[in-house]
Amino acid sequence: MDTVVVGTTKVKTSTFYVDVTDCGGEDARPFLVDATFYRVHNEQRVSNIREDYFDEESTTWGFSGTTRWDPRFMDNSYAGSWSPYVSAWGSTQDEAYTQRFWVQRAARATTNATPEPIKKRRKITVNGTLTRASWDTNTYRPYLNQTVDLEFRTTNGSYKYVKSATTNSKGNLRTTVTARRDGCYRYVYTGHSTTSDAISAGDCIDVR
């Protein structure tokens, strides 16, 4: 597991894998494996843990389980890094924290370039928005004071960085560029530990 991105309605399911070795001596098969994810005061149990394989040479059992991330039963404090804690019982009990992973609030971006069509060397205004999922309200809310990259591509080219813009108190973006040739603009947000990245659909301009 690396990252789980959760929006406002769709339930996400993630799979957890763990190997258990020498649980109480040679060929000591663990009869119970339990896993729980922890973050501050929150916890998520891993359910349906099952044995996937046994490697006789290394005396290792592989287990996996699933957990559900339902935004209806989450709040914004769930966003960030989580630490899985695993217990395995054989003739002895072993416990350990394993590699952490991230749960992120889904982000969305939009782009609107105007006017279109436009004469060459005139100014294009590129508006946009950046919002992210709030699990407190189960809606997408404006994401303010965030740096977002504006990218451009020609009709047959690939997107390249043009400049950066910052969202205002309503999550809106606005910047201007000079019209030089036909092409498409889009806003790209790179995200961070608690929020996913977001790439808007491109908005194309006809330059005459």
Image (cartoon, rainbow, N blue to C red):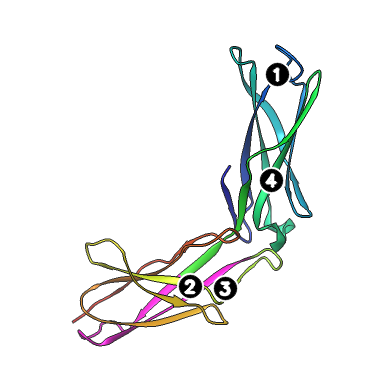
Residue 113 lies, in percent from the top left, at: 35, 79
Which residue position is annotated with label 3?
143
**Membership of 35 in magenta stretch:** no
Give me the residue at 63% from left, 61% from top: 8
Marks 1 and 4, Cα distance to the nearest angstrom?
Answer: 23 Å
For disc 3, the neighbor class at 10 Å (few under 14, some 14 to 19, many from 20) is: many
Quarter-of-image position of residue 133:
bottom right
Q: Position of residue 86 (x, y in %)?
A: 73, 35
Answer whether labels 2 and 1 touch (C-beta < 8 Å). no
Q: On the rendered image, what quadrant is the N terminus found in?
A: top right
Q: Residues within 10 Å of mark 1 (few under 14, many from 20)?
A: some
* Gap in angstroms between the C-alphas marked 2 and 1: 50 Å
The magenta segment: 110-133
Disc 1 marks which residue? Answer: 22
- Tell me the amino acid under the disc marked 1: Asp
Q: In which quarter of the image is the C terminus?
A: bottom left
Q: Name the residue under label 4.
A: 83
- The secondary structure that most of the magenta stretch takes on is strand
Q: Do the residues labelled 4 and 3 touch (CB within 8 Å)?
A: no
Between the C-alphas of marks 2 and 4, the distance is: 29 Å
Q: How would you rate the neighbour count of disc 4 (Cα within 10 Å): few for under 14, some for 14-19, many for 20 or more?
A: some
| Residue matched to label 2 | 147
> Which residue is painted at 58% across and 12% down in the image?
57
Work out whether 169 lies above or below 47.
Answer: below
Measuring from the top left, give residue 58's x and y in whole percent.
60, 16
Please tell me whether residue 6 is drawn above or below residue 35 in the rendered image. below
- Is residue 130 part of the magenta span, yes or no? yes
Q: Pointer 2: residues within 10 angstroms few (<14), some, or many (20+)?
A: some
Q: In this view, does 203 lie to the left or right of 130?
A: left
**Pointers 2 and 3 in contact (C-beta within 8 Å):** no
In the picture shown, does residue 60 fall above or below 34?
A: above
**Residue 104 relative to residue 93: left or right:** left
